[in-house]
Image (cartoon, rainbow, N blue to C red):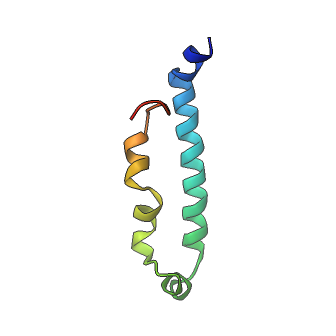
Amino acid sequence: MSRLFNNSWTVRWLRYLNTWREHRRIIKELNALDDKTLRDIGINRCDIDRLIWLEYDKEKRGKNNNEK
């Protein structure tokens, strides 16, 4: 039963939704900083989305944790 639950599209969707919410929270926090502060930590405003959504996240969208 637990295997069926882990492979469910609903569970995968909920995991993605959780990841998306966390990423959005971080993006909002970084966008709230002024340009000088972003430069001080080595980030350009135009790079925020690319830095937060790593290639790994893009590849894992819609897959469960057991898939590669």
Give the number of callouts: 0
User: Could you say where residue 7 lies in the image, as x and y percent from the top left?
Assistant: 51, 21
Compared to residue 52, the image places residue 18 above or below, namely above
Please provide percent x and percent y for residue 39: 48, 85
The quarter of the picture where residue 53 lies is: bottom left
The one of 62 and 32 positioned closer to us in this rendering: 62
Res 10 quadrant in image: top right
- Work out whether residue 35 or residue 67 is closer to the camera in this orientation and state it: 67
Residue that appears at 56% across and 40% down: 17
Q: Position of residue 62 (x, y in %)?
A: 44, 33
Q: Is residue 19 above or below residue 54?
A: above
From what the image shows, is residue 44 above or below residue 9? Answer: below
**Residue at (62, 11) in percent of width and height:** 1
Q: Quadrant of the C terminus?
A: top left
Identify which residue is drawn at 40% across, 72% down.
46
Residue 41, how many percent across, how many down? 52, 82
